[in-house]
Image (tube, rainbow, N blue to C red):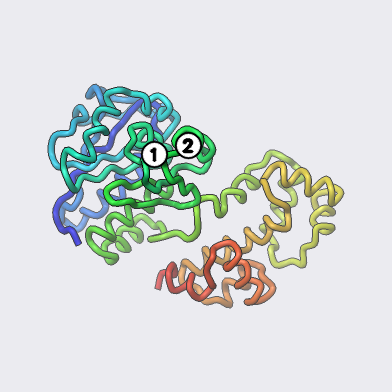
Amino acid sequence: MDKTLRQIDILLFDGLNILDVAGPAQVFSSANEDGTERYRLRFVSMDGMGVTSSCGLRLQVDTTASTDGRRDLLIPGGTGVDQAMHDRMILDILATWPSEMEDRRVISICSGALVLANAGLLNGRKATTHWRRARQVRQQFPEVRWSTDELYHIDGEVMTSAGVASGIDLALEIIKRDHGGALALAVARELVVYLKRAGGQTQFADLLEAQFSGDRELGRLLDALQDNPGRDWTLELMAEVAGLTPRTLSRRFSASAGLTPVKYLERYRLKRAADVLSGGAPVGSAIRVSGFSDFQQMQRAFKRHLNTTVGEYREKFADS
């Protein structure tokens, strides 16, 4: 494990997502809270001037971005990426990255991967980015081996992550590789986040899509499913609760969430079970809380959606 101090420049630009900056920055800063400086952060912009984030918050910087010194570079995502990825000065800095100095990491959060891709840093590499950008990046950067169902991917000194929360996941993984699992776990507990989340980034994205649907009838059904996931739900019963015909319910639910209501229920049960198991609860509690009828039904769901067994999941992700 590398015990040396790592210096990280966090590149700021107009339109960045503030959480893409704050999440990883706080993780790295928290690794220093025992009095040992392991990560030294510097906030930079291309002209040395402050920037405005996508939410309107103004951010000040420490200095102008440069390639001087033994520094890693972290690039956040946000709506401003579409302009930043064509910024000639940013591309010129990234063009020097592979050859100018060894052991210099470049880290992207969320759609920040598009900046790396446009600079050619990801050509021939495996990388991830936010799932909403999946179609765009595959069309625009076919030389990259995109794996947009991963929360993060580390390919040597080039590290990419999928979204806001996965930027935190990646920062914790970096700490784990640099200084060991005990420190990474301590930071995760301090920030009250999972040390490592299961599955890919799209694993439960459809649940969020459905949850925030503005459809009144679907909202009524979702509330009922979440209040009582263990009920013996059938499509006909779901339709009755929603006040729709089974055919109309299936059509509107698929249009809103991209999956059928029956599949949604299985994924919702799976997510509840995974959350409970990650917290260290026994399997029996996960079955009761999630609404699975028995262990075998829960086991089949874990194999189908997470490509693992319940036992393997607990061993890998549960906080003992």
Residue 18 in sight from this viewpoint: no
Q: Position of residue 70 (x, y in %)?
A: 14, 42
- Quadrant housing residue 124: top left
The residue depicted at 57 percent of the width and 74 percent of the height is 285
The residue depicted at 19 percent of the width and 30 percent of the height is 66
Q: Quadrant of the C terminus?
A: bottom left
Which disc, if any, is residue 137? 2
> Foreground residue, 223 or 233?
233
Q: Is 207 placed left or right of 195 in the picture? A: right
Query: Which residue in the protein does label 1 denote?
Result: 113
Q: Residue furthest right?
A: 245
Q: Is 68 placed left or right of 190 in the picture? A: left
Proximity of marks 1 and 2: CB atoms separated by less than 8 Å: yes
The residue depicted at 70 percent of the width and 62 percent of the height is 228
What amino acid type should be assigned to the residue bearing mark 2?
Val
Q: Quadrant of the N terminus?
A: bottom left
Q: Position of residue 123 (x, y in %)?
A: 36, 40
Callout count: 2
Q: Position of residue 317 (x, y in %)?
A: 44, 67
